[in-house]
Amino acid sequence: MNHSITEAPPEEIATELYQIGSRLRILSEFSRNQALRAQAQERRVEFFNGYALLLEASKICDALGLGFLEIA
């Protein structure tokens, strides 16, 4: 996106949100893998919490993207 979000068409915003959501899903999988490898229970909990938060943020981005597509 090369201009202000207020000037961007809804389709472009939806695309950006989808890309952000996709990156968040990748990061969530990384966090889950780190949790499975962690030896200390405290670290496992931290990574699993990160996994859950990143996955939820990804779902929010997807929902927002769909909303912008409906506007278009």
Image: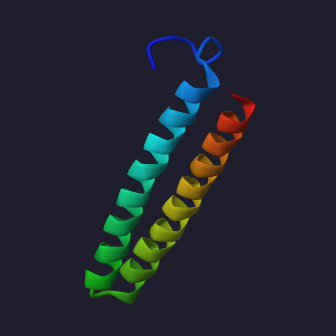
Q: Is residue 50 above or below residue 20?
A: below
- Left or right of residue 33, residue 2 in this image: right
- At horizontal 39% and vertical 49% (from top left) the residue drawn is 23
Q: Is residue 72 above or below residue 69?
A: above
- At horizontal 71% and vertical 41% (from top left) the residue drawn is 67
Q: Is residue 29 above or below residue 18?
A: below
Number of disc labels: 0
**Where residue 4 sits: x, y (%)?**
56, 13
Viewport quadrant of the N terminus: top left
- At horizontal 44% and vertical 53% (from top left) the residue drawn is 24
Colour scheme used in the picture? rainbow
Q: Is residue 42 above or below residue 3?
A: below
- Left or right of residue 33, residue 50 in this image: right
Q: 28 or 69, which lies in front?
A: 69
**Where residue 49 sits: x, y (%)?**
50, 72
- Left or right of residue 32, residue 11 in this image: right
Viewport quadrant of the C terminus: top right
**Where residue 46 sits: x, y (%)?**
44, 73
**Where residue 3 sits: x, y (%)?**
50, 11
